[in-house]
Image (spheres, rainbow, N blue to C red):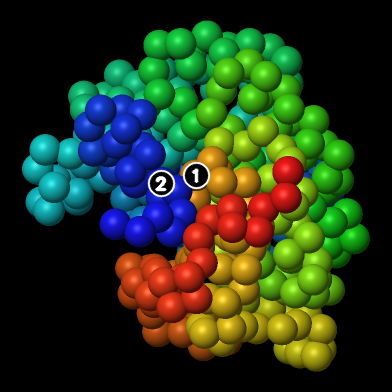
Amino acid sequence: MTFLYNDYGSWLTAQLGVKAQKISLNAGFTCPNRDGRVGTGGCTYCNNQTFNPDYCITTKSITQQLEEGKRFFARKYPNMKYLAYFQAYTNTYNSLDALKAKYEEALGVPDVVGIVIGTRPDCMPPDLLDYLFELNHRTFLLLEYGIESTYDATLSRINRGHIHAQTVDAILRTASRGIRTGGHVILGLPGETRADLLDEAKTLSSLPLTMLKFHQLQLIKGTRMAEEYRACPADFHLFTPDEYIDLVIDIVERLRPDLVLERFVSQSPSSLLAVPGWGLKNHEFVDKLRRRMIERNAHQGRLFIP
């Protein structure tokens, strides 16, 4: 098969020696730009309902959420193993003892073979990193930072509450401990041009990241960004599927060849979208992307400059 990009599924199976499915968890955390430590209101685009399954609620324990998630996936994949995915809000934002209790509970559930922790770059204290260094030696661990943008003007506009230098610092400290380090980036945030996004590929490639995931900007009902769009739609460029596919390919060709690419697109429930979505399921988008890459004779790293 022609190499197009380093896909996450193949990489994960190679890492674990078995196929594994992530189960999203809501561990009851908040964020420092919600509780007043660095800001209030949260990121202007954020509504965690867009990715929380029905079983993923804080009234249920970590074990309950995992067991319900396992039952959901086992109907289709009876021999699957699982990763506990601490996804909602900032999953390193609590005391060390409270965090350890959540992580260790997850790892005690049968068939859970590792954990993925989603967090912010400004929420990785040294004592937690010491514990994660130890944890990484006894189970699969992936730490996923919400980068969102590498531009400080954008980070300020979307109320992230941190700057890009903090992202760089967190990624360097984490990767230097031998921990698999991932990043999440939103494409199409207001104020960013196509040229900005292509330059961002160079910046991301310069960081010691193991994995990257992208998704297109979606405007979610009830968010501050949806209100901003209603007030001034000219400030936003919402991609068509074909336009976005070509942008993603242009970015992928400029990325470091060894970066693992987990995701290119997100599919929020249509009931939550303030602006109609594309009507494409994730696998349908990936199929279109791969066909377009073959048409263009494109592959990851083709235009990468070290």
Report which residue position mark 1 lands on: 260
Relative to the observer, which residue lies in front, 287 or 143? 287
Is residue 133 shown above or below 15?
above
SS at mark 2 in the image: helix
Give me the residue at 79% from left, 53% from top: 150
Give me the residue at 51% from left, 83% from top: 241
Q: Residues within 10 Å of mark 1 (few under 14, many from 20)?
A: many
The reply to whether residue 91 is in sight is no
Is residue 32 shown above or below 288?
above
Considering the image in quadrants, where does the C terminus appear?
top right
SS at mark 1 in the image: strand
- Asked whether the beta carbons under mark 1 and mark 2 sit within 8 Å of each other, the answer is yes
Whichever of callouts 1 and 2 sits on the residue coming sooner in the sequence is: 2
Position of residue 108 in the picture relative to residue 195 (left or right): left
Q: Quadrant of residue 41?
A: bottom right
Position of residue 185 in the picture relative to residue 24 (left or right): right
Residue 163's x, y, as percent? 86, 45
Relative to the observer, which residue lies in front, 164 or 34? 164
Q: Residues within 10 Å of mark 2 (few under 14, many from 20)?
A: some
Residue 238's x, y, as percent? 65, 83
Relative to the observer, which residue lies in front, 17 or 271? 17
What is the CA distance from the residue labelled 1 to the residue labelled 2? 6 Å
Residue 114's x, y, as percent? 37, 26
Position of residue 151 in the picture relative to residue 289 (left or right): right
Q: Say which amino acid is labelled 2.
A: Tyr
Report which residue position mark 2 lands on: 8
Give me the residue at 72% from left, 50% from top: 305
Q: Quadrant of residue 219?
A: bottom right
Is residue 92 shown above or below 162?
above
The reply to whether residue 125 is in sight is yes
